[in-house]
Structures are given as structure tokens and as C-alpha cells.
Image (cartoon, rainbow, N blue to C red):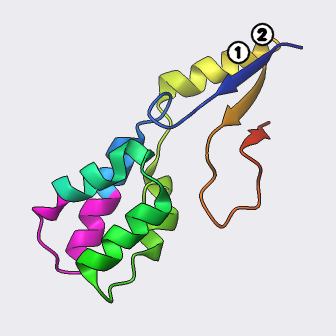
Amino acid sequence: MPLLMIDLDNTLVDRDTAFRAAATAFLAEHGLPEGDLDWLMALDASGYSPRREVARALSERYGGIDTQDLLDRGAADRITLSDSVREALVEARADGWSCVRSSTPRPPSPEPRSTARG
């Protein structure tokens, strides 16, 4: 059975758009300047910045504001799978491929980095 390994972040799903929406909501919820959105996007670096560095920078900039929800679920809760991608994955499975996502899980997930999906 052939194996199709897929990295979702900014390949099959638009993580940057999801993070932008999460960051915009975070800023609005806490009455923070809209102009900080560009700073947050640069800090996140499309998800490539180490979470520890992002958390530290957020803490330094925003003091006592709880940023954990933004870090843990912000982008992940806003990600959508387009119909064309969903259809392609269904077709791949119908053609006998086993699909596995290879992506960094959002904490505090106990899942390993690669997880088979049914």
C-alpha cells in the first residue's frame, strides 16, 4: 500500500491566514493596537519561530496578558481545508494511498509528529 506523507502548514492549508485571523482576534479582544498585527506575523514567521521565543516576545510586549490560547489554539482553530484539497485526498485514498500528516502537533498534544489519519 503506497504511503502519502503530507505536511499541512502552508502547503495544503493556509496556516498564515489562520494565524492572521487569530492574531487579529487576540489584538481586538485585549484592546491592543491593530498595528501590532504586522509585528505578530513577523514574530510567528509562518510558524517557523520557536514557540519559546514567541512566548517570550509576547510576554515582554504584552506583560500580564494571557497569550496561551493564541499560542496553543489560535491558528489551529481557524484552519480550513479547501474543497479541492479534500477531494484530492479522498481520491488518493480511493486509489489505495494511505495518507499520513507530518506536522508539528499543537501542544499539549501527546501525539507523535507523524500520525496516520483515516
Real-space Cα separation, disc 2 to disc 1, in angstroms? 5 Å
Residue holding disc 1: 92
Left or right side of 85 for 114: right
- For badge 2, the amino acid type reads Asp
Taking the spot 46% from the left edge, 47% from the top edge, the residue there is 79
Under circle 1, the secondary element is helix
Q: Position of residue 99 (x, y in %)?
A: 74, 26
Under circle 2, the secondary element is loop
Residue 25 marker: none
- The stretch of residues the image draws in magenta is 22-37
Placement of 70 over or under 90, stated as above or below: below
The magenta stretch spans residue 32: yes
Taking the spot 77% from the left edge, 38% from the top edge, the residue there is 117
Q: Position of residue 60 (x, y in %)?
A: 29, 77
Placement of 52 over or under 80, stated as above or below: below
Residue holding disc 2: 95
Judged from this view, the residue extending furthest toward the bottom is 64
Taking the spot 33% from the left edge, 85% from the top edge, the residue there is 65
Left or right side of 103 for 20: left
Taking the spot 61% from the left edge, 47% from the top edge, the residue there is 104
Q: Nearer the viewer, residue 82 or 50?
A: 50
The quadrant of the image that shows the C terminus is: top right
